[in-house]
Image (cartoon, rainbow, N blue to C red):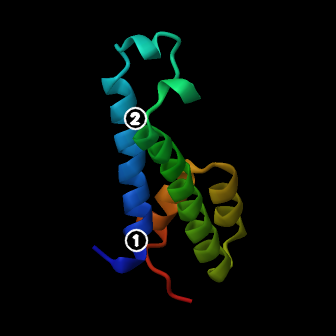
Amino acid sequence: MRKDNVIPLVSLALLACAIAYLWAISGQPRMADGGLSDDEMSWAEKVFVLIVPLSTFATIFIAARRAYWNGSWFWLLACVVLWPLAYVYTLLVNRNNVR
């Protein structure tokens, strides 16, 4: 694994864990309305809810920075507007931080 892609890989793993966790607790009574509110969540769940989007924003920033350095305005705008494309760009298209 390249050190340039640690943040996007960890972010993608956190996103997958969040989806799996929500699927795992979907049968609990506190999820009867389809979501969790503040009083229904433990402190660990609250921290997890903050870490997942922060890691996604970090991946978007990395993708936008790489696209800017390469002069690709298409990828820069695509990664900022459509956040899943930031994972595609950082992990498949432009896989290193060469300036």
The residue lying at 39 percent from left, 28 percent from top is 22
Q: Secondary structure at mark 2?
A: helix
The part of the image, by quadrant, that contains residue 65 is bottom right
Residue 80: % across, % down: 68, 57
Question: Which of the numbered marks, if any, corresponds to residue 19?
Answer: 2
Q: How many marks?
A: 2
Q: Secondary structure at mark 1?
A: helix
Q: Amino acid at mark 1?
A: Asn
Question: Which of the numbered marks, if any, corresponds to residue 76?
Answer: none
Residue 60: % across, % down: 59, 61
Disc 1 designates what residue?
A: 5
Q: Please state which of residues 16 and 52 is positioned toward the viewer in this rendering.
A: 52
Q: Please state which of residues 80 and 47 is positioned toward the viewer in this rendering.
A: 47
Residue 32: % across, % down: 46, 10
Q: Mark 2 or mark 1: name the one nearer the start of the chain.
A: 1
Q: Amino acid at mark 2?
A: Ile
The residue lying at 34 percent from left, 23 percent from top is 25
The residue lying at 38 percent from left, 70 percent from top is 6
Residue 9: % across, % down: 37, 61
How packed mark 2 is, by other alpha carbons closer than 10 Å (few <14, some 14-19, many 20 or more), is few
The residue lying at 47 percent from left, 30 percent from top is 41
